Amino acid sequence: MFLLPDYRVRQRDYLLSISRALTSRLDLEEVLGLIVQAATAMLGADVGIIALRENDTFHIRAGIGVAAEQLPLFDELLEGLPTHPEEELDVALFQSRMRSVARKINLNLRQGIALPMSFGEDMLGFLFVFRTYAGTPTDNDYRLLQSFADQAAIAVHNARTYEIANRERQRLAAILDRSADGIMILTPNLRVERWNRALARMTGLSAEQAYDRPHEVVIRWKRREMGQTLEEAIAEGWPRRYPGESAPDTIYVQGDLERVDGTTISVGITYAPLTDEDGTLLNVIANVRDITHFREAEKLKSTFISVVSHELKTPVALIKGYADTLRREDADWDRETIRRGLAVIEEEADRLAELIENLLAASKLQAEGMKLDLDDVSLPVLVRQAVERFQTQTDKHTLVVDFPDDFPIVRGDRVRLRQVLDNLLSNAIKYSPEGGKIRIRGSFDNDWVQVDVSDQGIGLPPDQLDRIFERFYRVESSLTQTTKGTGLGLYLAHAVIRAHNGKIWARNNPDKGVTFSFVLPRH
Ligand code: ADP
């Protein structure tokens, strides 16, 4: 065969430029293109092709010497190629397929060499070259081609390793970023290496802004209530590794952090050291947890205790006071005084019973959700009964019922719906101390029935129209200070309506007072 006299020099040139391409950031397709071009030129061949293996099939990834649209015709060569470096290529089959391809592409391919590209145990693909003249490839041809096949194998291996590492890195970044907790990774000299999205949200400092800044600059404690700061702990020799323990100790610090905008946020931070086998510190990994919710729960608990103790103490004191007075043996009470005293005792006992009922319902609701006892319910009837009960308690308010005659029957839990109406009516009375009209209106369409309870009372601050349905939530005002209540009524009403697949909301009236509305599905 004919080889250019300076082929060794050219071979080195090619191999050098391929090595350069391998170490530069060229993508895999480009490197493969370069290799197949060099191999074809060096061997004085006419056509060159590289096919890569994916699972059990091979796909052409680079070709030279044929038009791109003819490349798929070479797929025929790829069937049944060995998928393991130890398997032998069936040379006769390969030659006959080569002739079949040659006929199809109208090129007189008379000589073909197929060399496996393998990396260790892994068969990565094949490098093919074809010549249009007859002859047998020499050992030198094979050696030369093998050097290119090896280069290609390295390129593929590198690209795949890089891709896997890259994917792994992206996955890790995504995990860090999606974590609901703030995560920060620090270098051994306590500069920020990573700062995830949750932490950016908590502190108001973006990852770019935090990057490479010292820990003490980005984590500024406004108030500390537990534990040492990282800097203090390090001054005392953290992290220490205790004999017999596999992992070094972590530290926890809790308090209020100053955010970028000057506000504060309550957090708990756990710092864990990452060390190598010799105990050298590689990174500090910090997990920052927003404990505002936890704080709110604590507040809720103390509100609960103060509300309950206040609400229980008042009626009990009244009951005890009246009972004491009435049973004094040195006094002779007239019938009217006794009647009024007993009325107060009864009212206060009812209030206690209602409070206890509400508390039980709320804690049960939290524990097991709401269970409904469904029945056919006539809301106009329920409303009229409630109005009758409440009208006797007030002469300052006029209660008006306005329901169309054909108001539909709904499926619902009668006892619970009565609780909702009772609550809305008692609130309407409580929060309109000047009196006025309280109107309960019914309406419906094909899908829903709606009940509106409107009063002419004090109304609600617009930003609290939703919050009043939260557990124990009461609007802070002089009236709520003096009126009895636990902030549970609307929470329970909301839960009842939700359990019926309905909705409840409050809107201020254009002139005065509030309208509470709820809808229930008709079917
Ligand atoms: P409470 O036991 O305090 O009445 P609720 O859950 O029934 O608890 O109501 C929560 C808060 O919503 C009340 O404390 C009050 O501030 C406000 N509120 C409820 N109904 C009305 C109303 N009709 N008008 C004005 N404010 C109301």
Image (tube, rainbow, N blue to C red):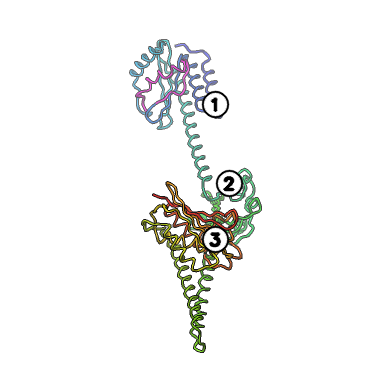
* Eye-nearest disc, 1 or 2: 2
Q: CA distance from mark 3 to mark 1?
A: 87 Å
Q: Is residue 83 above or below residue 280?
A: above
Element under label 3?
Answer: strand
Q: Earlier in the sequence, mark 3 or mark 1?
A: 1
Does the magenta run of residues contain 11?
no
Residue at coordinates 46% horizontally, 26% vertically from top-left? 150
The quarter of the rendered structure image containing the N terminus is: top left
Q: Which mark is residue 440?
A: none
The residues tagged by marks 2 and 3 sit, at their Cα atoms, a distance apart of 58 Å
Q: Residue at left 49%, top 41%?
A: 171
Look at mark 2 in the image and give the residue it sits on: 195
Magenta range is 58-83
Amino acid type of the residue tagged 3 in the rendering: Lys
For this rendering, which residue is in front, 35 or 482?
482
Q: Residues within 10 Å of mark 2 (few under 14, many from 20)?
A: many
User: How far apart, in angstroms, are the residues tagged by discs 1 and 2?
Assistant: 35 Å
Q: Earlier in the sequence, mark 1 or mark 2?
A: 1
- Which of 342 and 143 lies nearest the eye of the viewer? 342
Does residue 248 appear in the picture of this structure?
yes
Q: Amino acid at mark 1?
A: Ala
Q: Secondary structure at mark 1?
A: helix
- Judging by the rendered image, the residue that carries numbered circle 3 is 437
Task: Give how far across and how far down residue 202 sits, in percent.
Answer: 59, 51
User: Could you tell which of marks 2 and 3 lies nearer the N-terminus?
Assistant: 2
At a point 51% along the width and 37% down the height, the residue shown is 166
Q: In this rendering, does residue 363 appear at all?
A: no
Query: Vertical placement of 294 versus 278: above or below?
Result: below
Q: Which residue is drawn at the image coordinates 51% and 16% (left, top)?
A: 7
